[in-house]
Image (spheres, coloured by chain):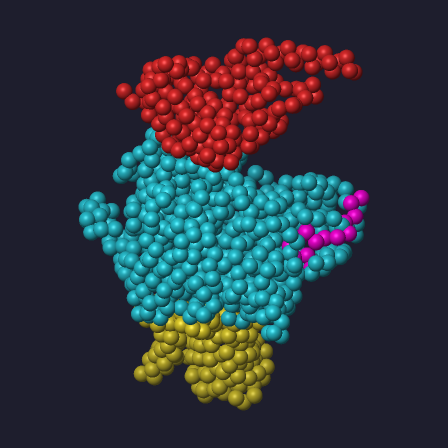
Chain colours: A yellow, B cyan, C red
Amino acid sequence: MKIKSILTAAASAVLAIGALQAAPAHAQAMPHSTEPPFSHEVFTGAVLFEKLEYGWGLDGPNIGRWDGQAWYGGDVNRVWLKTEGETARNGRVESAEIQLLYSRLIGYYWDLQAGVRYDIRPRPDRFYGVIGLQGLAPGMFEVDLQGFVSERGDLSARAEVSYDAYITQRLVLQPNIEANFALQKVPELHVGSGINDIEAGLRLRYEFTREVSPYIGVSYERKLGDTARYARNDGEDVGGWTFMTGIRLFF
Amino acid sequence: MTNDKLSRRRALGVGVAALAFPAASGALAQPAVGRAMPREFNLTLSHVTANITGRRRPAMAINGQIPGPVLRFREGEEVVINVINRLREHTSIHWHGLILPSGQDGVPGISDGFQGIDAGGTHQYRFPLVQAGTYWYHSHSGVQEQSGIYGSIVIDPATPEPFGYDRDYIVQLSDWTDETPSHVIANLKRDPGYYNYNKRTLASLVGELRRAPDGAARSAIVSDRVMWGDMRMDPTDIEDVGGYTYLVNGHTPAQNFTALFRPGETVRLRFINSGAMTHFDVRVPGLEMTVVQAHGNNVRPVTVDEFRIAPAETFDVLVRPRDGRQYQVLAESMGRQGFAQFSLATREGLPALPLPPHRPRPVLTMGDMGMNYGPSGLDRGTPMPEVDAPGHVAPMDMGGMDHSAMQMPAGGSQGMQGQSVGGMNHGNMTGMGHSSMSGMNQPAMPGMDHSSMRGMAPSSMAGMNHGNMPGMNHGSTGAGAMGGMDHGAMAMPDPLVNDVGAPPGARVLSYRNLRAAKPLYPVREPTRIIEIRLTGNMERYFWSINGNSFSQAQPIQLHLGERARFRFVNETMMSHPMHLHGMWMIPQVGNGAENPLLHTVNIKPGSTLDVDIEADAPGGWAFHCHMLYHMETGMMRKVSVVSARQAASAR
Amino acid sequence: MRLVTSIAAVALAVVAVAAQTRPAAADSAYQAFGTRGRAQDVRRTIDIVMRDNSYQPQRIQVRAGETVRFRVRNAGELLHEFNIGTAAMHQQHQREMQAMFDSGMMSATSKDAMAGMDHSRMPGMNHGAMGHGGMNHGAMRHDDPNAVLVDPGKTEEMVFKFTKAISLEFACNIPGHYESGMVGNVTFSR
């Protein structure tokens, strides 16, 4: 089915980055050269699926969700591939996007990123230019701020903040909050202007290994403003609670 | 190492397969004098499978053994060493601590005319030996050293050493990981805390709060956590890599290498730290040790209970177990992850004595941050953009001191309000190397006791004008390096004292205790001071010198015949054992003409140390941190020693 | 003032003479395991070479009741001692030697550093603790049968009779030498 093929495409694109790290097993840094010239620059990569989960809607539909990132490069310049998306009640992919970015270290903890984003769903599919800032803020908050300009000239933005609280050496509580904004309303995508939606989540994971950590969690999602109005008109929920289980992969 | 030895070990059920032990004859070296030794050696490097922890893992070995064979030379002779590379990759062998021509030093791309040894190729090293003592050798390509390409060197002296002993043993400490070394780097690059299973957690916070004596202590604990979180740093991050098994001459702690002795004998232990990433704290419960050589050079004997040995260092000590008891020599890793250990006993085959519990894990304090609170710029701590020209010279003029360049954390030190504490310019302060501070106004500084200011280059503390330093509490005397100058949480660490957690009263070796028995160079003023800032990005796990990784950096040029002073400023939270090839490093520890001659100088977090170098060896020399993964991710430079004529024509 | 100084000098001299004629208590510790040997009882000579800072050989074997002549040659450039005693005796002796070095009574290269020293200006010297059979102002001499100080390049002899088999070491107690391994073992055979 279409969903499967899209999901497969997105997953394999991300995993292609992982493949760049050479089989077998997990990550291997491309050894800096033992051949002349001995530059000693190390090229390496990583794949992180922060969310790979199935959620039972407590007052809404069940959803599947994924959020993955992969990067490859040296210390300062890297290439990033990001993907995120949601499936809906009948397995239909509600939203799916993929980003390809060039990233440059501009501070001890911050990367400046720029590239393109392609939304496979919802239809009509759309391309966006992306500029973003990703890094670690004081207090150990992981921050990802992105601004988008669509091929139609519509401006939007996204902000995501999360925090890893270690309860024990392996049990980690991760609260996070994500908000989407749009400057102009985009009726064909059922997006209003202003704050579109907010999602707040709390995930508790157990790191059996750093690479594989199953988790459970709850999240609350809410559409706001005109976006909410569009949703109601479609007969969809404006928001609600979800209880989910998932697995976090980092390799 | 013979086949029958192998089968006997298997019979003992020790579970060691093919290659995990040293040449036993090498380990039991006799202090023979006058024995003619072979002049030519063959070293064959190959891929092997090692079984050290019970898992068979790929490794690399020299002549089929890990560590490689002991090379026993005689001072004054010329040696020929053929290295046969049967690895599938480029390799090289570097002779650590040996004074020899640059072309024989074995660093691909840096040693004159040496590009390494191709896979399948052979290379002949040939050089005269101009020194005696304990040294070692290892691969200088990639991370092969971690995979097993290392061995020891003993050079018998031409004239008798100024000490006596009945027998000697090589004690080569190392760290073994079952992981592929390049995987280790990859793990660190995507998650710097990957190996840290001692993080601060909610559970540990609850425990600490419960143990706290009162409300003030409790709020101090909480604000300390908040402060480190604000700085985005982890004070429990002491050792980058975990999962190591610590070996002595290739033996695991369970295998318990045994150094035999007869009661009443004086035993010489040649400690070599061939660990890739591990500092060891060495002690022998029940025995004191007399250090007679440091880095191969004779020092005035100094008796200690414990010493810290950084990667690449060597110390020769004498112990005298008078009774026939079994003694356990303990080398505890600095991060308290494990012990390397072996027995001193009167017979073979004894099991190891029970290990004591680990000492408390060290936790970084504000003092370890030196003068830098939180990183700025791509590489930690330096507020100035990269100013690294070849031979960059630190400013000699200290003038007034202005704190405005110094960022202070919230709730950090007492007595220093706000950003600007007028008059103290830390941009030029380079971590308080005091040797060139002029204009000190003594009367304006009550309570500052200079006689107790350890950790400062003692040459000239004249002229520090503290008159215009409002808000700085000079009244109270505090413990630590600067008696009389109370920075509160900002106590400056003594760059030479090693806090190994030994019981009070224990004698712990520091560089200050090392006095060269025969200084090689007369004391003279350096021609210039070159600032060597040790920098790095812990988040991304890359390290650098003066903010430049090796691939981006210019060589440091020294003039043949000059005495250059390297002013090390450690702007990171980790210790870095800095190693210069081909020339001796003379740390300025206050012993004048007797300052020790070392090949590797350990620079503690947040500290500054002046090290003089007599640049008497022409050519290209590697200069790098000897923490293998720091070097591999950029903490290396080429030092070019050129004659004045060459330098002039190059312009 | 001069009167007081002269009285002090006389007092010191008297004490010095008295000390010389009576062995100090610490010295007789060797009597627990041996005594001065008589030349006619010597059956064996053991040659000891002293270097900076080690002995050769590093272990000797004797029998209880045996009288041995030790021929001790200093092949080094520093002053060395050959002293037979228990580990505890050596520790004590090292403290005394350190004091003598600190006060300038001994030098690193010669035991005769004391010639011509004016004792009237050396207050506070505790002669009781000197423990070397009294103070010899002309030259620093070890009069005990169990110890001998040898100048660089010289050879000295010592005849000692071992009366009891206990754990003994021969050592040089000059500061820094013992820790450098200038110590050996005396083992007893039946």
Q: Which residue, as the protein is rendered here, is positioned at the far bottom?
A: A152
A94 on left or right of A130 = left
User: What residue appears at the point 53 percent right and 18 percent down from the top-left corner?
Assistant: C132
* Along the line of sight, the residue nearer the viewer: A246 or B519: B519
B225 on left or right of B240 = right
* Along the line of sight, the residue nearer the viewer: A163 or C16: C16
Q: Does the magenta portion include B432?
A: yes
Question: In the image, residue C9 lies at what x, y percent?
Answer: 69, 14
* Along the line of sight, the residue nearer the viewer: B612 or B218: B612
**Which residues fall within the magenta stretch?**
B428-443
Question: In the image, residue C20 lies at what x, y percent?
Answer: 56, 13
Give the quarter of the image for residue A132: bottom right
B302 on left or right of B68 = right
The answer to whether residue B415 shows anywhere in this view is no
- Give the vertical position of B303 relative to C146 (above or below): below
Question: In the image, residue A1 lies at what x, y percent?
Answer: 31, 83
